Structures are given as C-alpha cells and as structure tokens.
C-alpha cells in the first residue's frame, strides 16, 4: 500500500523537475528531427491546395464539366485530409515545445491550474509509474519508478 496523495505529489514534482533537465532538452531536440517531416508535409499540402485551386479555375472557366471536376476533386480532398492528419499528429508532439524548460514556471502556477491541464502536462512527460513493494511503514519515494514518455 502507498500513500496516494504523497505519491502523486512526488510524481508531480518529478515531472516538473524533468521538464528543466538536459534529458528533456535532448528529447526536445530529437523531436526537432520531425521538423523535416513537417516541412515535407507542409510542402505537399501547399501543392495539393494549388492543384485544388487550379481545378476550380478550370471548372469556372468551363474547361471541365462538373462530373470531371468532382472526379478530380474527391481524391485531392482525400489526400489533403491524410496530410492534415499527419500534420496534426506532428503538432500534438510539438505541445511539448511549450513545456520543456518551463518546469519552474509551471510549478509556481500548479495549484491554480485546472485538473485537466495538470493531467495533460503529466501525460506529456510521464507514461506510467511503477510502485515497488514496501519495506517499511514510512513513505519511500524510492519505491516509485517513473517511466518517462520518449
């Protein structure tokens, strides 16, 4: 058995501390390797949007029929949706950008944050924590082993 409030307090302090560590900076730097993928997807999205504009111009000028326009538009929209989903996934990981290096500031405002915001911050850094068996009757933070995200 473990004192849950003390364990949560310890894990919160560990998460906020980790945000300011060189390890977290390294994780953050590794995420910037995804920047190339983001640029690639953004470029692909711009090309698809350009093709959509070109298709609309062809339709408005009467160069293609409504049926031809729809047949060309539907696959382009599906491709755009796929690219947007991939960009959204990359953007979700960039939420960490706003946290890394700000552990101290987050710690100062922690009590004023809504529970949902606190949980989102913890989830962005901590995957799970293992609590090892007790060896005595006192709270021992050494029993808690965090598994960090990334």
Image (tube, grey):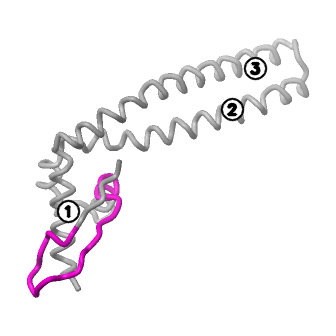
To which residue does mark 3 refer? 56
Q: Which mark is residue 48?
A: none
To which residue does mark 1 refer? 12
Looking at the image, is mark 2 or mark 3 earlier in the sequence? 3
Q: In the rendered structure, which segment of residues is drawn in magenta?
A: 120-144
- Cβ atoms under marks 3 and 1 closer than 8 Å: no
Real-space Cα separation, disc 3 to disc 1, in angstroms:
53 Å
Q: Which mark is residue 79?
A: 2
Is 74 rendered above or below residue 103? above
Looking at the image, is mark 2 or mark 1 earlier in the sequence? 1
Indicate the secondary structure of the residue bearing disc 1.
helix
Horizontal and vertical percent position of residue 28:
29, 37
State the residue at coordinates (64%, 37%): 82
Horizontal and vertical percent position of residue 77:
71, 33
Q: Nearer the viewer, residue 43 or 64?
A: 43
Kindly indicate the quadrant of the structure image that contains residue 14.
Answer: bottom left
The quadrant of the rendering that contains the N terminus is bottom left
Q: Is residue 28 magenta?
A: no
Horizontal and vertical percent position of residue 53:
69, 18
Real-space Cα separation, disc 2 to disc 1, in angstroms:
41 Å
- Mark 3 or mark 1, which is nearer to you? 1
Looking at the image, is mark 3 or mark 1 earlier in the sequence? 1
């Amino acid at each position: 058995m473990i004192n849950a409030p003390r364990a949560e307090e310890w894990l919160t302090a560990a998460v906020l501390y980790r945000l300011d560590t060189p390890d977290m900076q390294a994780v953050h730097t590794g995420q910037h390797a995804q920047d190339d993928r983001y640029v690639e997807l953004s470029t692909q999205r711009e090309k698809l949007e350009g093709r959509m504009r070109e298709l609309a111009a062809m339709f408005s000028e009467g160069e293609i029929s409504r049926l031809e326009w729809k047949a060309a538009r539907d696959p382009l929209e599906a491709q755009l949706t796929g690219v947007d989903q991939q960009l959204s996934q990359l953007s979700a990981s960039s939420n960490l950008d706003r946290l890394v290096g700000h552990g101290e500031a987050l710690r100062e405002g922690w009590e004023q944050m809504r529970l949902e915001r606190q949980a989102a911050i913890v989830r962005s850094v901590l995957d799970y924590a293992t609590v090892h068996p007790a060896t005595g009757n006192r709270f021992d933070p050494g029993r808690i082993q965090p598994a960090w995200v990334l």
